[in-house]
Amino acid sequence: MANSKGRRRRFGAIRQLPSGRYQARYPGPDGVMRPAPKTFATVGDADDWLAEKQTEVRSGDWRDPEAGAVNFKVYADKWVEDRELGVLTHDLYRYLLDGHILPTFGADDLDEITAPLVRGWRTERLQTTGARTAVAKAYRLLKSIMETAVDDELIRRNPCRIKGAGKEKAAERPIATVAQVDALADQLGPRWRLMVYLGAYGPLRPEELAGLRRRDVDVQALKVTVRLAEPERTNGRRAPGETKSEAGTRTVFLSEFLRAELRVHMELFAGKGPDGLVFLGEKGAAFRRSSFGRKWRRARDVVGMPNGFRFYDLRHTGHTLSTRSGATLKDTMVRAGQSSEKAALIYQHSDADRQREVAAGLDAAIRKARQDAAAVPREDTGDPDGRPSGTNLARDE
């Protein structure tokens, strides 16, 4: 068909419909003829649209209009399964998808999710849940999925373009004093005392404590070797595996004041044999996070700690005291099993001797804090040493 100027059209085709409007079609790079998504009032309008499509094809910006017709839920589910995620990260992503993202976008195709819809979704989530941290995580996950869709050339542009929406503004985590750590250990009782101290002064992560075996503990040398982690999934099952990072596999040298705590615990509460778990529940099986959590909350309330104080926050106490005892940033990273900023710290070194020095410095700091606390007059507690009852099972020898 000739155009309005009498020239033969070199790209695409236009035909007039019985309605009097015009339909335009063009060949994509694959040779398939594709119609315009709408009809046009004039030949000139149809010709202009064809010119835009020709420019897109020549510049390499053209994309198949059907490419984005992929269901978001199908794509997101495959996105999660295709990644080599740790079990806790996998559970987190499933929670964020099922609880925050799919109820809104699960029935949509990828190319139907627009920037205005994303903004509306985020606003609704914030207003409905008030969980700013969870919404920030959900937004980051949605943005990552859609960015992969861009890379796969299923959509042209990522609709997640809200500045700062993925940032978590968590409150500064509280730090316990030495006296508060002792009080928490006392309240939790003999079976869990060592867990509190290793969580604070190791400082070991909860999943690392859950994975400790008898062979990992050397009472004589005062050291604990972290080889694996056993996080508990949302279904209550443990998932033994590697530590959180490569740096997580490490040997932690303990302070001298923990020798008695370590010896008593290994004699009375640890599992039998080299592979016996160091921390067991009252019935002799691996403890459950939920049951320990109840004990932790009761102890926290009795001691008077803030409601938001988590077991994991004990690590902040250990970090702070290690730094005050003279530990360098690298020393603290090695001790806590952290691998961030590896490029900047690659030329720094913290060997076993230095780790023993850090443990000794930590020991001195804790002993001094206890001495200072003991020097303050106290009310009668019924204990000749002036300590709360139950603290003298295994204390400084």
Image: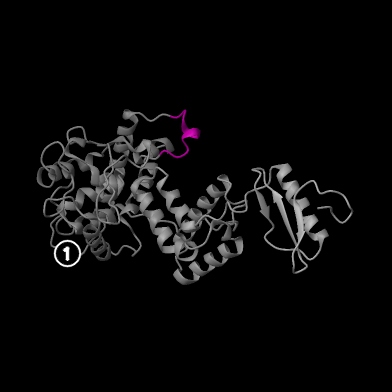
Q: Main secondary structure of the magenta part?
A: loop
Find residue 45 and report its image quarter. bottom right
Look at the picture and state if 162 lies above or below 345: below
What number of labels is visible? 1
Residue at 31 percent across and 41 percent down: it is 362
Secondary-structure class at tag 1: loop
Name the residue that disc number 1 marks. Answer: 380
Between residue 241 and residue 71, name the one nearer to us.
71
On the rendered structure, is 33 left or right of 226?
Answer: right
Work out which quarter of the rendered image holds the C terminus and state it: top left
- Across and down, in percent, residue 316 comes to 37, 50
Find residue 94 and report its image quarter. bottom left
- Across and down, in percent, residue 157 comes to 62, 52
Q: Is residue 345 magenta?
A: yes
Region of the chain picked out in magenta, as a range:
339-348
Amino acid type, label 1: Asp
Residue at 28 percent across and 39 percent down: it is 228
Color scheme of the displayed model = one colour
Identify the residue at the far right of this view. Answer: 5
On the rendered structure, is 347 left or right of 261?
Answer: right
Residue 367 in view in this figure: no
- Across and down, in percent, residue 391 comes to 16, 54
Q: Is residue 219 magenta?
A: no
- Across and down, in percent, residue 262 comes to 18, 42
Binning the other alpha carbons within 10 Å of mark 1 as few (below 14), some (14 to 19) or many (20 upward) gives few
Residue at 18 percent across and 35 percent down: it is 215
